[in-house]
């Protein structure tokens, strides 16, 4: 499913135009990205939590050359799904 598909579904179920719905979806995504840039955690009850996690420096291996490479520490965005979300998906696919 793409962002355009999401816009179509929300637009048809809410009665908003596709342009208005696209603006809302884009606004939501921009807000999440901006908050994560500031290192904030975003909790959406029943869906999950977005947060920024610091990954420590580590040694990896280049599979082509088998040479060791140092991967520097970095901050990565993470999404942890809620228990209710996981349960719903599991029940629907069982």
Image (spheres, grey):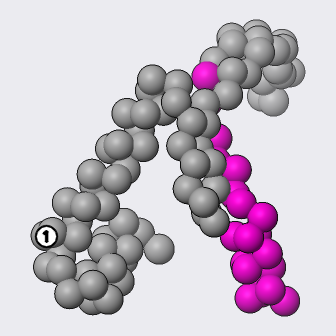
Q: Horizontally, is 51 left or right of 31 in the view?
A: right
Can see residue 10? yes
Instruction: Name the residue rendered at 64%, 56% in the picture.
Output: 48
Q: At 81% across and 30% down in the image, what residue appears?
A: 63
Residue 77 visible in the snapshot: no
Q: Is residue 30 above or below residue 4?
A: above
**Which residue is at a point 31% across and 61% down the rendered structure image?**
25
Which quadrant is the C terminus positioned in? bottom right
Q: Magenta residues, as a range?
A: 75-94
The residue identified by callout 1 is 19
Locate residue 12, reporting x and y percent. 27, 89
| Magenta stretch holds residue 66 | no
Most distant residue in the front direction:
45
* Residue for point 37% across, 33% down: 34
Please give left or right for residue 76 compared with residue 35 in the image. right
Q: Is residue 85 magenta?
A: yes
Residue 82 found in image quarter = bottom right
């Amino acid at each position: 499913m793409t962002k355009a598909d999401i816009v179509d579904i929300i637009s048809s179920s809410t009665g908003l135009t596709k342009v208005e719905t696209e603006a809302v979806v884009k606004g939501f995504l921009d807000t999440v990205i901006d908050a994560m840039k500031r290192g904030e955690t975003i909790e959406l009850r029943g869906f999950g939590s977005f947060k920024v996690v610091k990954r420590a420096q580590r040694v990896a291996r280049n599979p082509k050359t088998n040479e060791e490479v140092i991967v520097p520490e970095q901050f990565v965005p993470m999404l942890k799904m809620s228990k209710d979300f996981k349960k719903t998906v599991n029940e629907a696919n069982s």
